[in-house]
Image: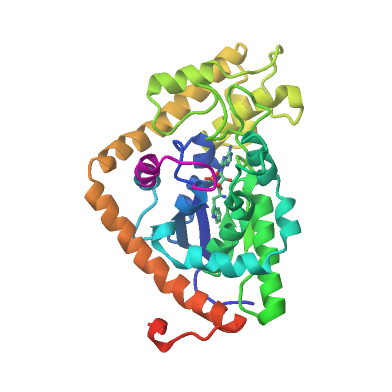
Amino acid sequence: MQVHRSRKRVFSGIQPTGDLHLGNYLGAIRHWVRGQGEKENFICIVDLHAITVPQDPEELRASVRRGAAMLLAAGIDPEETTLFVQSHVRAHAEGAWFFNCVTPLGWLHKMTQFKDKSARQGGKQDSIGTGLLTYPVLQAVDILLYDPDEVPVGEDQKQHIELARNVAARFNHQFGEMFVLPEARIAEVGARIMGFDDPTAKMSKSIGGRYHAVGLTDSDQEIEKTIKRAVTDSGNEIAFSDEPEKAGVNNLLTVYRMMTDKSPDECLADFADARGYGDLKKRVAEFVVEGVRPIRERYFELMDDPVELDRLLEIGAARARAVAEPKLLHVKERMGFAVPDALRG
Ligand code: TYM
């Protein structure tokens, strides 16, 4: 199905749990911020996805507000972007039932994130929640309720967006055209920022030790320490490279490239006089410190005013409901449910 709009519509989501890190920022958030105005943005804090692994209820409640404050601090403008919390828009959870009934089980068993996350929970069938398996179905609902043209995400979400497209095609085939097939937008650079302590693993909220990630609330000193300890190799050549043993240096250069907005050649020229990896780390740390500091400072200011944060999220939820609820009614009607007039709004 095609929808003609004056601006492209964008949908993306982010989990509230764990502090957001440089990978989230460079791989996703920064693209959302830069697309604002030119595109119609819907950005969702996916607290329903968070409970697919065990959560402490108080901590979950607090983390949703922290996530919102961080997105605003990183430049999401609530006038330009519909920023909302998934659980505030009931169509997401309700829609998941209909989508679950249409999505083949075999598609879900192929998802690499399910395999990884269930293995991290010990792979025990009697303790892993079913929601972990059906996670990508809820993600498909998130996306398809808004008929977006684009879904900007990091590399790790590629398979989930592909599944959403397949689910959309299946609905369109079974019940008549009703969903736009969204395109994953994965940036060429920075879509997979690696852990500083282990450049073979992507930077992640749920794994990694003290020097794995740069958190967006880390102090200048913490950022410097993490980057200075970054794992590299035993050589001394500063170059972009796909070689596994050069992954640490490549990751540092990629971060440098993104923080400075320079071309690869310009980046390499900046290090022409460098004396080894120590210099590289020092310069990367300087730019990351300068880039993260204003975000962190704004974040703490925003966290001081929870009433204002809640107000902004309520405005976002109202705007999201206005799109998602009629869409869900349409889906239900097509699937054979009578929709009472009272629900039509
Ligand atoms: P989440 O919360 O894990 O990550 C949010 C965004 O950050 C990107 N990202 C990275 N990019 C580059 N390097 C990294 N190391 C890195 N780590 C994370 C992710 O790719 C993502 O774009 N399932 C999703 C949330 C979601 C969603 C959606 C996304 C739920 N519904 C609908 C898009 C559309 C997730 O857990 O992202």
Does the magenta run of residues contain 57?
yes
Residue, x 47% and y 71% (percent of image)? 324
- Please name the residue shown 57% across and 26% down the image: 208
| Nearer-the-camera pick, 256 or 335 | 335
**Residue 311 appears at what percent x and percent y?**
26, 57
Which span of residues is magenta-colored? Answer: 51-64
78 to the left or right of 333: left
Estimate the x, y position of residue 135 in percent, counting from the top left: 59, 53
Question: Farthest residue toward the bottom?
Answer: 341
Foreground pick, 21 / 172: 172
Whether residue 91 is visible, yes or no, is: yes
Q: Residue at x 68, y 38 (%)?
A: 123
Residue 116: x, y in percent? Answer: 67, 39
**Relative height, residue 124 to residue 38 (above, below):** above
Determine the image quadrant of residue 156.
top right
For the N terminus, the quadrant is bottom right
Instruction: Give the side of residue 147 with respect to residue 72, left or right.
Output: right
Closer to the camera in the image, 139 or 284: 139
| Res 273 → quadrant | top right
- Report whether residue 70 is seen: no
The image shows a total of numbered marks equal to 0
**Which residue is nearer to you in this view: 217 or 167?**
167
Q: Is residue 157 above or below residue 102?
A: above
Q: Where is 229 relative to 219, above or below?
A: above
Q: Does residue 229 belong to the magenta stretch?
A: no
